[in-house]
Amino acid sequence: MSTFIRQVVRNKLKRLTTDEILQYAHNYHFSVTRNQAEAITDYLQEHTVDPFSPHSREKMLQELARITDQHTADKAQKLFEKMIQSYGLEHLFQ
């Protein structure tokens, strides 16, 4: 089952749209412009991102900070950790 979950998450990241990112930003109170959302989707589509790997996650958050700002990247990391815990998936992200 964990292989399936990992593949679903990776596919979702690859297929995120600009509008989805803007909607998530609105829902979770992030400040993201359309240009930043486009840059994020471009990055996710052009790079292999493995959120289950600490190294890959760190690299992704550094890129998010470059595209937006450090505050937004920190907020995204905290939200990500909170979501992992709420779904009881901590074991997949070590």
Image: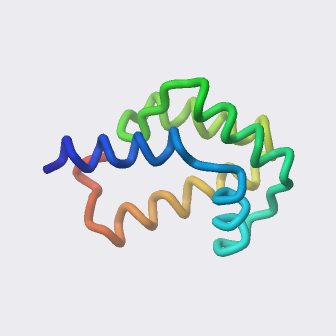
In the image, farthest residue toward the left: 1
For residue 52, side relative to residue 40 (left or right):
left
Residue 9, given in percent of the width and then of the height, sits at 38, 48
Q: Is residue 47 visible?
A: yes
Q: Quadrant of residue 65?
A: top right
> How many numbered marks have been drawn onto this rendered protein structure?
0
Residue in the foreground of this view, choosing between 42 and 92:
42
**Left or right: where 5 falls relative to 79:** left
Q: Residue drawn at (22%, 51%), measured in percent from left and top?
A: 91
Name the one closer to the observer, 6 or 54. 6
State left or right for residue 32 relative to residue 19.
right
Residue at (18, 47) in percent of width and height: 2
Q: Quadrant of residue 66?
A: top right
Point 35% across, 72% down: residue: 86
Q: Position of residue 7 (x, y in %)?
A: 30, 41
* Quarter of the rendering occupied by the C terminus: top left
Q: Is residue 94 visible?
A: no
Q: Identify the residue at image location x=66%, y=75%.
A: 27
Q: Position of residue 71 (x, y in %)?
A: 76, 54
| Quarter holding residue 30 | bottom right
| Left/right of residue 17 with respect to residue 51 in the rendered view | right
Q: Colour scheme in the image?
A: rainbow
Spot occupied by residue 74 in the image (x, y as percentages of width and height): 65, 53
